Image: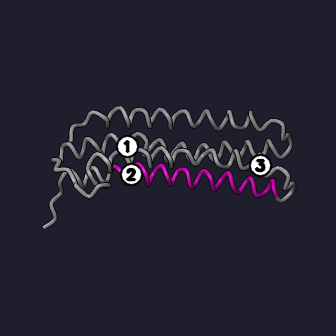
Amino acid sequence: MFELNGIVFAMLGAALASGLAGTGSAMGVGVAGEAAAGVIAEDPSKFGLTLLLQALPGTQGIYGTLMAFLVLNKIGAISGNFATIDAATGLLIMFSCLPIAIAGWTSGYAQGKTCAAGICMVAKRPGEVAKGMVYGAMVETYAVLALLISFLAFINIPV
C-alpha cells in the first residue's frame, strides 16, 4: 500500500509552484506573442521591441521553477537520497509553495495582457517601449513579492 508521507506533500508543492507559475507564464507569453505577431506582420523592424515585451511574462515560470528546485534539493530528490519527513513537515513545505504557485499563475497571465497592450502601443509609437515595460513590471511586482513570501516561509522548515 502506498504511504502518504511528507515527501508526497513536498513534491506536490514543488509541482504546484513550477506547474502553475509556468502555466501563467506560458499563457502570458502566448497572449503577448499574438499581439507581437500582428505588429510584426505590419512592420518587421519592430521585432526587437516587441520581443522585449513578449518575454517579460516568462519570469513567473522562472520563479516557480526556482522554488521547486529549492524544495527538491531540500528533500533530497535531486541527489536521490530522499529525506525522511513526516506529513506535517511535508504540508508545511507544500503550503510554502502556494504563494508563488498562485500569484505566478495569475500574474503571468495578467502581465501577458498588459504587455500585449504595450506591444499595441509600440505599433504606433515605437519610442514608448520603456513605458510599456514599466506597465508590465508593475504586474511583475506581485510575483516577486509572492516568491519572497514562499522563500521566507520555506527556508527555515527543518528537514
The answer to which of 63 and 119 lies nearer the viewer is: 63
* 3D distance between C-alphas at marks 3 and 2: 33 Å
Crowding near pointer 2: few (<14 within 10 Å), some, many (20+)? many
The magenta span reads: 13-40
* 3D distance between C-alphas at marks 1 and 2: 7 Å
Please identify the quarter of the rendering in which residue 110 is found.
top right
Q: Residue furthest front?
A: 79
- Tell whether position 39 is magenta: yes
Secondary structure state at the residue bearing disc 1: helix
Q: Mark 3: which amino acid?
A: Gly
Secondary structure state at the residue bearing disc 3: helix
Question: Residue shown at 72%/37% (left/top)?
Answer: 132
Q: Mark 2: which amino acid?
A: Leu
Q: Are marks 1 and 3 in contact (CB under 8 Å)?
A: no
| Disc on res. 16 | 2
Q: What residue does disc 1 label?
A: 98
Q: Are marks 1 and 2 in contact (CB under 8 Å)?
A: yes
Crowding near pointer 1: few (<14 within 10 Å), some, many (20+)? many
- Tell whether position 95 is magenta: no
| Disc on res. 48 | 3
Q: Is residue 62 left or right of residue 7?
A: right
Q: Residue furthest left?
A: 1
Q: Where is residue 105 shown, x and y percent of the image?
A: 49, 47
Q: Mark 1: which amino acid?
A: Leu
Q: Where is residue 10 shown, x and y percent of the image?
A: 28, 49
Question: Residue shown at 81%/53% (left/top)?
Answer: 39
Secondary structure state at the residue bearing disc 2: helix
Q: Are marks 3 and 2 in contact (CB under 8 Å)?
A: no
Return the disc, 1 or 2, that comes first in the chain's sequence.
2
Q: In which quadrant is the C terminus drawn?
A: top left
